[in-house]
Amino acid sequence: MANEARQGYVLLAEKTAAEALANELQRQLQAADSAKQSLLEQITKDTAEDAQREKDREQRIFEYEVRLSQANRRCTLDRSDLDAILRNP
């Protein structure tokens, strides 16, 4: 009878430990999911901001080219020239 009681206690202890492990893994999974969601939201926000900055930059370039054109001037630099300038300060 004492042996059966010990076996029952061991099974209960193992069950309790397994449940605690399962709960901890679930908590970690939820924390990871929350962190992933936050990162995805930040990436979406950053991507939108980058796109807006690029759009603003392109608009400023266009406006500058219009002003040059109105003054009968031209800027013959193209993207490859700008890249070369930026690479060799």
Image (cartoon, helix red, strand yellow):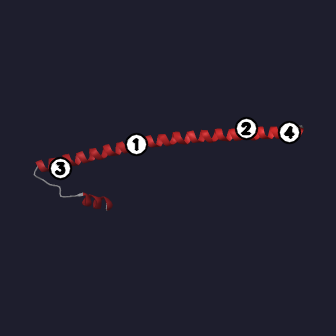
Report helix, strand or loop for mark 3: helix
Q: Which residue is mark 2?
A: 16
According to the image, label 3 marks what residue?
A: 65
Residue occupying image coordinates x 64% and y 38%: 23
Give the Cα separation between the discs numbered 4 and 3.
90 Å
Residue at 37%, 45% (x, y): give it: 47
Residue tagged 4: 4
Q: Percent x, y for residue 88? A: 31, 62
Q: Nearer the viewer, mark 2 or mark 4?
A: 4
- How far apart, in angstroms, are the residues tagged by discs 1 and 2? 42 Å
Marks 3, 2: nearer the viewer: 2
Q: Position of residue 52 (x, y in %)?
A: 31, 43
Category of crowding for the residue at label 4, using alpha-carbon neighbours closer than 10 angstroms: few (below 14), some (14–19), many (at least 20): few
Residue 85 vs 7, above or below: the answer is below
Which quadrant of the rendered structure holds the C terminus? Answer: bottom left
Residue shown at 19% from the left, 46% from the top: 63
Residue at the right extreme, as displayed: 1
Residue type (three-letter) at the residue carrying disc 2: Thr
C-alpha separation, residue under disc 1 versus residue under disc 4 = 59 Å
Q: Which mark is residue 61?
A: none
Look at label 3 and name its amino acid.
Glu
Looking at marks 4 and 3 on the same chain, the residue that comes earlier in the sequence is marked by 4
According to the picture, the residue beneath numbered tag 1 turns out to be 44
Label whose residue precedes the other's in the sequence (3 or 2)? 2
Task: Give the CA separation, mark 3 to mark 1.
Answer: 32 Å
Residue 64 percent location from the top left of the image: 19, 48
Viewer-closest of 86 and 9: 9
**Disc 1 residue type?**
Thr
Q: Secondary structure at mark 4?
A: helix
Q: Secondary structure at mark 1?
A: helix
Q: CA distance from mark 3 to mark 2?
A: 73 Å
